[in-house]
Image (cartoon, helix red, strand yellow):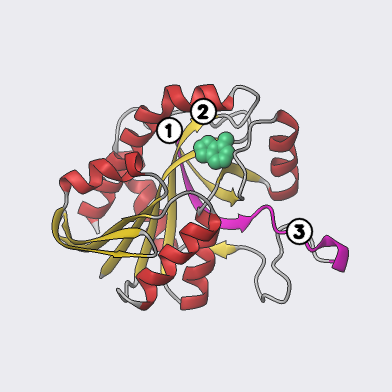
Amino acid sequence: MKLGIISAMEEELAPLLEAMEVESTNTKANMTFNKGKLWGKDVIAVVSGIGKVNAAICAQILASEYKVDTLINVGVAGGIGKDVYPGDVVIGDSLVEHDMDATKFGYKHGQIPRLDVFDFKSDKTLVETAKKACDSLENINSFVGRIVSGDEFVSDIDRIKWLQDTYEAISCEMEGASIAHVAYLNNIKFVVIRSISDNANNGAHMDYEKFLPIAIKNSVTILETMIKSM
Ligand code: ADE
């Protein structure tokens, strides 16, 4: 197995890099690719930067140049719905780009025109492994469901309601679906694991600052448990 791990922000990846035996680093597209061993596995870990384009470029470099066979996207996300709270973990089994809108041509929201799938499905075994890792840890509430991504920090109650009604989403963030899209086009397994930093509502940016450290801690703990069990 050759594993690519992508986080959008430095603070999300920092604890993993500390645990990793980095053998080499290489900069491409302004991103530093750290190659080495993490809990016994061959890993390339990289901070992509925020948003769908950065994440897609990063995932494609991992696919084309590093020939990874598995992509894991880890980081924080906004919670959607009444059950998902800061500190909880969401495992995306289905990913959709929520800001794709070709509805004028009769496509439903989120559908990429002329693509043969609506959503990008995570690898079932990776989802199960991630869920088992969450269940084995005390005090971690986890959910499996659809995560939607867009170039937007969601901080509006009507917008979350729209995301929930339109996509049945349990969480929103800004990269996962574009990584999933690249994985799909390259025929690579992937999973998106996110820890909730806010409820994507009107105070989202303030909750985000407050819960970011705990959310990062949770996602790293899960990844460690998961990778050790793989
Ligand atoms: N990442 C963390 N919280 C988010 C939010 N509310 N919207 C988009 N991305 C996020």
Q: Earlier in the sequence, mark 3 or mark 2?
A: 2
**Residue range highlighted in magenta:** 88-106
- Marks 3 and 2: which is nearer the front? 3
Q: Which residue is mark 3?
A: 101
Q: Which residue is mark 2?
A: 85
Label of residue 141 in the image = 1
99 inside magenta stretch: yes
Amino acid under disc 2: Tyr
Nearest to the observer: residue 168 or residue 212: 212
Q: Residue furthest front?
A: 30
Nearest to the observer: residue 88 or residue 59: 59
Q: Earlier in the sequence, mark 3 or mark 1?
A: 3
- Marks 1 and 2: which is nearer the front? 2
Q: Position of residue 211 (x, y in %)?
A: 43, 25
Tell me whether circle 3 and circle 2 mark residues in contact (CB < 8 Å). Answer: no
Question: Does residue 69 lie above or below 141 as drawn?
Answer: below
Tell me whether circle 1 and circle 2 mark residues in contact (CB < 8 Å). Answer: yes
Amino acid under disc 3: Asp
Number of other residues with Cα within 10 Å of mark 3, as a class: few under 14, some 14 to 19, many 20 or more = some
Q: Residue at x 38, y 77 (%)?
A: 64
Task: Answer left or right for 182 relative to 12.
Answer: right
Q: How many labels were placed on the picture? A: 3
Q: Residue at x 43, y 51 (%)?
A: 49
Number of other residues with Cα within 10 Å of mark 1, as a class: few under 14, some 14 to 19, many 20 or more = some
Task: Answer left or right for 129 relative to 55.
Answer: left
